[in-house]
Amino acid sequence: MRSKQLEAMVGNWIIGYVRGKLDNRQYGSLKGRSTTHALIDMVHHWSNAFDDGNSVRSVFCGLSATLRRLIMHRNSVLKKLAAYGVQEFITKWTSSFLINRQQRVKTADVLSDWLTLRGGIPQGYWLGSLIFLTIIDDLHSQLLTHKYVDDTTVYEILARGEVSWLQSALDELIAWSDSNYMNTNCSKAKKMILSPLNKQQPFSPVILGS
């Protein structure tokens, strides 16, 4: 319980530094934001596109093994927190929070041995999600991008015959993931085309990853 209270206190300190600075299209793990808000904003853009007779081409993807790799390269975490003006004693405490985490399993009165985690922050830690938001905040694209924690939607609005830039935007996403020690979960990515029936047009295929 005391650990949770300390985590909440440090998390609120960090929130004080990053509030109002995070990407306005990040809808995850933030008070007053939800998947509903993300969907409403996307549907708003898509509906306006349809009203203008345009098509929408979207890719839905996620970032996998994120915290696992971030812990290995925690200096990246500290640099990004410092860029928000977070004080040094908080970033140092956060670094300590991220490393050498241990856990064990209890069944009835039997306890397993302690195990040092290689996967970073255990599930259920709010501070872990908050730290992740600061890391992914500078993920931007030349196209419209919506984020819900590690779930990312990139889409473009195209008039008939207009050149597509979706592949270029996805290449940017992959490059950003590589430089920030993350993996783009290409196997679970989904593509979607929304187009008025009388405005359907052929689209060149897009490739997410190699």
Image: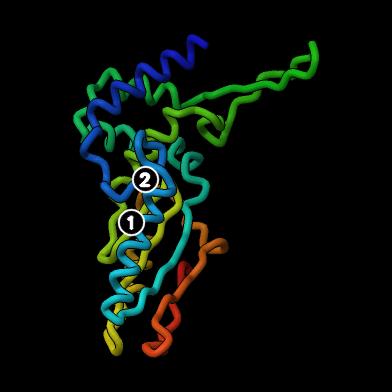
Q: Position of residue 201 (x, y in %)?
A: 39, 89
Confirm or deny contact between disc 1 and disc 2 (CB under 8 A). yes
- Find numbered disc 2 in the image and state the secondary structure of the residue it sits on: loop
Label 1, secondary structure: give it.
helix
Task: Say the numbered circle drawn on residue 27.
Answer: 2
Above or below residue 8? Residue 27 is below
User: Residue placed at 37% from the left, 49% from the top?
Assistant: 37
Q: Residue 147 carries which label?
A: none
Mark 1 residue crowding within 10 angstroms, few (<14) / some (14–19) / many (20+):
few
Residue 111 falls left or right of residue 179: right
Of labels 1 and 2, the one closer to you: 1
Q: Is residue 178 visible?
A: no
* Mark drawn on residue 41: 1
* Residue 164 place in picture, x, y as percent: 31, 80
Image-quadrant location for residue 118 = top right
Q: Where is residue 55 in the image (x, y as percent from the top left)?
A: 35, 78
Asked whether residue 78 is in view, the answer is: yes
Image height of 179 relative to 158, above or below: above
Amino acid type indicated by mark 1: Asp
